[in-house]
Image: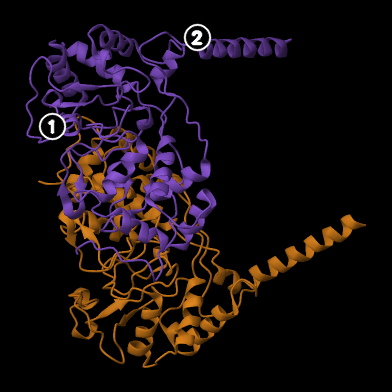
Chain colours: A orange, B purple
Amino acid sequence: MKMCITTTAVALALAAQVAWAESPRSEPVQPVPVANISQPALAELGKKLFFDPRLSKSGFISCNSCHNLSMGGTDNLKTSIGHNWQQGPINSPTVLNSSLNLAQFWDGRAADLKEQAGGPIANPGEMAFTHELAIGVLQSIPGYVAEFEVVFGKSELDIDMVTDAIAAFEETLVTPHSPFDQWLLGDDDAITEQALAGYQLFKQSGCVACHNGPNLGGTSFQKMGVVEPYRSDSDAIGRAAVTGKDADRFTFKVPTLRNVELTYPYFHDGEAATLEEAVDIMGRLQLGRVYSEQEIGQIVAFLKSLTGEQPRFELPILPPSTNETPAPEPFG
Amino acid sequence: MKMCITTTAVALALAAQVAWAESPRSEPVQPVPVANISQPALAELGKKLFFDPRLSKSGFISCNSCHNLSMGGTDNLKTSIGHNWQQGPINSPTVLNSSLNLAQFWDGRAADLKEQAGGPIANPGEMAFTHELAIGVLQSIPGYVAEFEVVFGKSELDIDMVTDAIAAFEETLVTPHSPFDQWLLGDDDAITEQALAGYQLFKQSGCVACHNGPNLGGTSFQKMGVVEPYRSDSDAIGRAAVTGKDADRFTFKVPTLRNVELTYPYFHDGEAATLEEAVDIMGRLQLGRVYSEQEIGQIVAFLKSLTGEQPRFELPILPPSTNETPAPEPFG
């Protein structure tokens, strides 16, 4: 008899779970989908490349240096450190869930992750290498050549293969199952009352007009400083650098709010050190609204419920260079 | 019947294996012991700290930056890059199997891994922080404080606890089961004839006088340039910096040859780019012997048989900073 009751309880619980999955709440924000890894060997190769500093002139800077997967896919610096300790012009955006964005970089100058991946390698202020030199390094490493051959069926490497692989790895970097996503799927107890109040305020006061979709952002370009201008020492002019239009000055891709607890400091110039500061500034500059301390606390509680499961994987072991591999030039 | 034969075969194979383990070859080199992780929680905490760039002034450099566990526990640079892209004075030694060394650093100025771990954090040319500031950062991070409390039973952090944890992680970084170790344990087929000839030559011509023990090195300090002086642009004077004795000038801890295929470039100044070059120079300068090309090939084949199983573990996810955490100062 006891057995029957238990079974029934399990059945009810399962039914409830199915019900969530079938009828998520109808909201302007959707859960982060679990990664669908269609080409695991390609993604594994991309993981190695993502962690390989030999894609930089110095042999010291890898993708993971500024998009550190131990730290929310960012470097947690205002602006990044590039080759020869150059100060970057902009805050390094998180690589987590970046496949959900309409375009890449703050100004959207790359259409997708594949196009983005080639940028920093050849940027003189970042990895300071060239695509040709990077390919020369990889081509000299038998461990890589063999892996490229398995994945692509050819052993003559090119930058397209490299960026394909890095993008495939980055597509795996999603963070599902955050408390807020569990709430979205019907679990009333997944977030606190304070966080729920924060979400209601986030919707009612207009944040969600830009921070929407599964990534709570990444769906549009918007002007930084709508009601009041944003004052910054940053030289970044945003989307105008891509379109050439004055109307696009200080227009940036709306950043994701997923894992925002981990991706401090905030804004394209990294000038907001805390979530409280960022919410206060956004309210005043974008919405013309001064949030009370209590309201800021509610919105921040909501934002912290957006921290999902971080990607978990083994640190890759990189294939060694050979006598034929060009040496890095950190001080050259 | 077939079943019985199979069982007998298995029994014989097992007996052979036991025989290896019980009677390893009697050689001046011994197998790397498998890690005995006596305090797993302490080592896990140490792994996080090893990967945490917040132990540096810039928030950009971690232990793993120069002792990269994707690349044989080194940075594969002649000399390392420190805070503000300063050029380090010496080649970064591998952290792999470093618990087997008689002392740490090229000049042995740290008695053990715990003492070593505090050095780079406070070295103005490396992580450029202070122990006090590093503790202030960690103390402001609840995720760390909770983990220190579990491990040490107290929530007031100090640098001793930090270096204890990093050393405990580093003690796990051993690389057993190399082909050569399998040969040492009795498997005649584990290395090639060329590698075996290289090992015989390595022993007969005197390399093993210094490169001995389980780490093929790390057991003594020796002068670099015994028969002929070593010409270098490096300012490093070696052990004399510790002892103050002229006799110790250019005397360095004998480096391990374990995983030497992965830890290029070679020597304290990183000036030997290839194993062939390193073997040639060692022969002439230390032994007064000019190895033939064939002999160098044999010794290099032996050296490549020393690559063991690299430590495999999940990339740690670091606990986030809080509003109270002092911000890094990469450009300050």
Q: Residue drawn 39% across and 92% down?
A: A290
Q: Residue furthest front?
A: B244
Residue B53 lies in what quarter of the image?
Answer: bottom left
Residue B70 visible in the snapshot? no
> Where residue B237 is drawn, which disc sits there?
1
> Where residue B126 is drawn, which disc sits there?
none
Say which of A18 and B144 sits in front. B144
- Which secondary structure, mark 1? loop
Q: Describe residue A8's horizontal placement relative to residue A220 as left or right.
A: right
Say which of A173 and B182 sits in front. B182
Q: Could you tell me which chain the residue with mark 1 belongs to?
A: B
Residue at mark 1 shares a chain with residue at mark 2: yes
Above or below A222: residue B283: above
Say which of A148 and B25 sits in front. B25
Q: Position of residue A219 (x, y in %)?
A: 39, 75
Q: Could you tell me which chain the residue with mark 2 belongs to?
A: B
The N terminus of chain B lies in quadrant = top right
Q: Position of residue B35 (x, y in %)?
A: 47, 31
> What amino acid type should be assigned to the residue bearing mark 1?
Ile
> Where residue B23 is drawn, which disc sits there?
2
